[in-house]
Image (cartoon, rainbow, N blue to C red):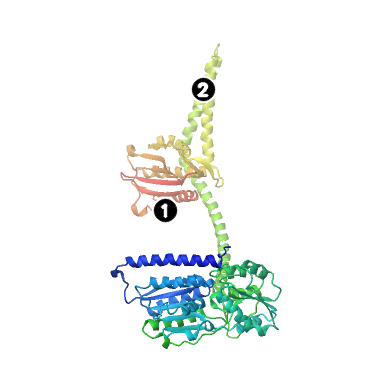
Amino acid sequence: MRFWPTAVSWRRFCARTLTAALVLALLLLGTLHPSQSADPETKRVLMLHSFGPRFKPWSDYAQTIRSEISRQRQKPVDFLDHSLVNARETDENSEAAFVEYLRTLYASRPIDLILAIGAPAANFVQRRRQRLFSATPMVFTAVEQRRIKNEMLKENDTVVAVAHDFPAAFENILSVLPLTKTIAVVNGTSPNEKFWLEEMRRELAPLAGRVQLRWYDELSFEEILKDAAALPPHSAIFWHLMNVDAAGVAHEANDALNKLSSLANAPIFSYDGSFFGEAIVGGPMHSVQESGQITAAVAIRILNGEKADDIKTPPTGFAAPIFDWRQMQRWGISESNLPAGSTVYFRQPTVWERYSWQIAFIVAVLLIQGGLIIILLREHRRRHLAEVLSRQRMAELAHVNRFSTAGELTASIAHEINQPLGSILTNAETAQEILRSPNPNIGELDEIVADIVQDDRRATEVIRRMRALLKKAPFEQKQFDLNEVVQETIRFFSALAIGRNFQLVSAITTEALPVLGDRIQLQQVILNLVMNGIDAMKDTPREYRIISIRTSRAENFAELSVSDRGPGIPEDKLKVVFEPFYTSKPEGMGMGLSIARTIIEAHTGQIWAENRDRGGASFRISLPLVQ
């Protein structure tokens, strides 16, 4: 909190400030060049504020008047603002200096109109009218009619006044809150506020028998807050003015009012609409907008050439009652207690009132969605069962396909098994001969036994691979290196390549290609692609029968290609070769490539066919790598 200086020091401060300002203004005026004069079409309006531009209620009236003049005139207006800071207390010396400051400041370019905002400004102008632009039109506005001395009005003066009705304001409190027993009145100690204190005491005297009036004019604002927080039940607060409190502290804007509202245990009422919107319950009050529009209209008439004294405006009273719904809810005020013709602002509609059609729409959508979800769940279950059955059938078909492929690999399998079996027989017979000799060579026998063990393992591995290929097992995802599966598959074809007269060329990347999937099923895909390539090259010259198997890594994918040098695939058939029952072989079923596509897509991969530039077809597979 900050306190204002004593009256003597304040007068000295104001006098020094005004003197300095006067000197500065004279220097500035002396430096102006005639060419710097403003456009004569632009009217200069001096707005003289009571106390300052942020003091309620006059700040709201000034802003509204300013906006309305600009809107209604639609021509340039130069607004010049000055504040009567010495109105907080009576000081003849500083007041005279302020008059001289204004006269000097505007000596070279007269003012077209003066707007005195509020009673302090009006009283100041009437006291100093002879020396303060006596020939300049003057509008006294935002002032109560009792604060204007009509006998001192000049021919260039006109008044846009209001008429207070304090008894009506207090009757509104007792009507809205019938149980009210105490009303605390907030009022400051500036000369203007002291005037109204006496007026209110006089006008409200008839209420003495109905309600207790508690006056806060002799308390500092901090003391007011403490007392308001401890008011007895069935109390109310009437906010008149608090420009300067008993401690000499000035209060701008609505800061003091809002703080009082947050701490007081009673609702707050007022007489002026400028205080409405945050802390005031409401009632019949002066309309800032109405007064501002009237004042602006009068000002424009004067700026357009009418004589101020010819414009007569009757004082305006309280407007129709308005109330703040939020404050009514806070204090439990029923709308049935409001005066007839009242308007309630800031009402919070119920959720249904605010969003009725949205709620109805959402409920309808939810019901529709619920029905669709039920249908979709049923369809999902049916589809899931169908997919399970389809996978079972596809697995069985893939198993049959593996048997068919194994039949075609019979020669290769027999060759792979016969080789280790023949070696085992030869080594066993050799061992028998060595054992029959008088001095068996133990070292040579040891080597023979090692060869027998190695050949046995070779035969066992061939049988294991075949059993794994033919085994009927469910889809099982495991992580493995795709390169290992490719190399193992190539070994299947080692003997078949000799029997079918074709070359098997491989280019396996040195990078590991870890993928997640079913090892046997992916092996079956490679087997199918190689067998298709072999069949496609049956009419190709022997020296050109080459199957190429390549693996590589492309960013986050493992790529595998199986290429042949056959006649290729017709361009119009590239997209249908994977369709079920499509085949170019008279004895084929047309299921091999369809099964391959199903397996690859189950591994979230892609498979496609394309023709090579130098003849033949290439089947390419892309599988996501395990990160």
Name which quarter of the figure residue 377 lies in. Answer: bottom right
Give residue 257's quadrant in the image. bottom right
Instruction: Categorize mark 1 by other alpha carbons within 10 Å: few (<14), some (14-19), many (20+).
Output: some
> Residue 396, image x and y in percent?
53, 49
Residue pointed to by mark 2: 427
Task: Say if 508 sits above or below 228 in the image.
Answer: above
In the drawing, does residue 29 fall left or right of residue 54?
left
Decide which of 616, 30 is in the foreground and name it.
30
- Spot occupied by residue 448 in the image (x, y as percentages of width and height): 52, 21
Q: Amino acid at mark 1?
A: Tyr
Q: What x and y, as percent, mark residue 463?
A: 53, 35
| Pick the front one: 313 or 2 | 2
For label 2, the crowd category at 10 Å Cα-Cα, with few meaning under 14, some 14 to 19 and many 20 or more, is: some
Residue where numbered disc 1 is placed: 582
| Element type where label 2 sits in the image | helix
As measured in the structure, the alpha-carbon distance from the residue carrying label 2 to the one carrying label 1 is 51 Å
Question: Contact, CB < 8 Å: mark 2 with mark 1?
Answer: no
Q: Nearer the viewer, residue 445 or 600?
A: 600
Q: Quadrant of the N terminus?
A: bottom right
On the image, the x and y values in percent for residue 514 come to 49, 41
Of residues 302 and 346, the one drawn nearer to the viewer in this rendering: 302
Relative to 135, 362 lies left or right: right
Closer mark to the observer between disc 2 and disc 1: 1
Question: In the rendered structure, which amino acid carries the disc numbered 2?
Answer: Asn
